[in-house]
Amino acid sequence: MIVAERKPIEQIEAMIEGFDRILIVGCGTCVAVCMAGGEKEVELLAAELRMKGKLEGRNRTIDEITVTRQCDKEYLDALEKYADDYDIILSTACGAGVQLLAERYDEKIVLPALNTLFSGVAEGAGQWTQRCMACEDCILDQTGGICPMTICAKNLLNGPCGGTDHGKCEVDGEKDCAWTLIYNRMKKLGRLDYLKKIQPPKDYSVMTKPGRYTHEAFKEAQQEE
Ligand code: SF4
Ligand code: SF4
């Protein structure tokens, strides 16, 4: 899932300065799970901005709505009947959701209320860690399901650096060395032989940005259009 956190209220206030009619649009998927931009967080943000506005004597309207997913066009249609009534839209989606919203309502100012952090997993209550950097060429089959691109501080693909120290990372002594983790997992799986294979450097020349992907089942239909 995508993990994000809300921007400080002062930063949000600075972005919306001068606008009187504001629609806050939440997203009910990843950012709801990480408690940054779902329905509840939108309610809280709207209440905070309303209260601040009142205390400062501002006369502004702040309304809210949360869609199922902001990164999916079909869910943005739900905003059609509201968008024109507002000066700006303040989105509490990840960066992808904000961009799709800005594209869909391209005559409207769409602002981000969150900072998108990473793609990761839940570790415990209120805690997430990054697990993937979307390198477009997954090698988890050869590293025991542990991503060296993400877990190793130096993104090393072929074993540890010289600084690895009794299983700890030289960059952050609190963290386990990714390559110790990989070695131990592969040993446990009886697959240490895989570590003898040299991983070629990632070919950044083919990683065109922005990344694009069309599912096989839809390619033919697209070509016919
Ligand atoms: S190797 Fe790591 S960064 Fe690349 S796709 Fe797999 S998990 Fe993601
Ligand atoms: S000590 Fe291990 S995790 Fe840290 S940078 Fe070196 S190889 Fe990567």
Image (cartoon, rainbow, N blue to C red):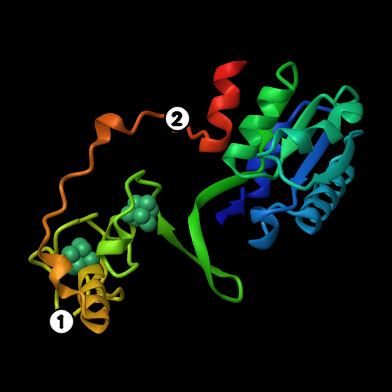
Q: Is residue 6 visible?
A: yes
Position of residue 111 relative to residue 38, above or below, is above
Q: Quadrant of residue 191?
A: bottom left
Mark 2 or 1, closer to the camera: 2
Q: Badge 2 local density, few (<14 within 10 Å), some, or many (20+)?
A: few
Name the disc covering residue 166, or none: 1
Q: Residue at x 41, y 55 (%)?
A: 132
Residue 200: x and y, percent? 15, 47
Is residue 21 in sight in this rendering?
no
Q: Amino acid at mark 2?
A: Pro
Identify which residue, 202 or 161, lies in the foreground: 202
Q: Residue at x 21, y 69 (%)?
A: 179
Quadrant hosting ligand 1:
bottom left
The residue singled out by tag 2 in the image is 210
Relative to 192, is 129 on the left or the right? right
Pick the front one: 20 or 138: 138
Q: Which mark is residue 9?
A: none
- Tell me the element at label 1: loop
Q: Position of residue 127 (x, y in %)?
A: 54, 70
Q: Earlier in the sequence, mark 2 or mark 1?
A: 1
Circle 2: element type: loop
* 6 lies above or below 215: below
Marks 2/1: CA–CA distance: 40 Å
Q: Position of residue 192 (x, y in %)?
A: 16, 74
Residue 105 placement (x, y as % from top left):
74, 22
The quadrant where residue 204 appears? top left
Q: Is residue 162 left or right of residue 219?
A: left
For the C terminus, the quadrant is top right
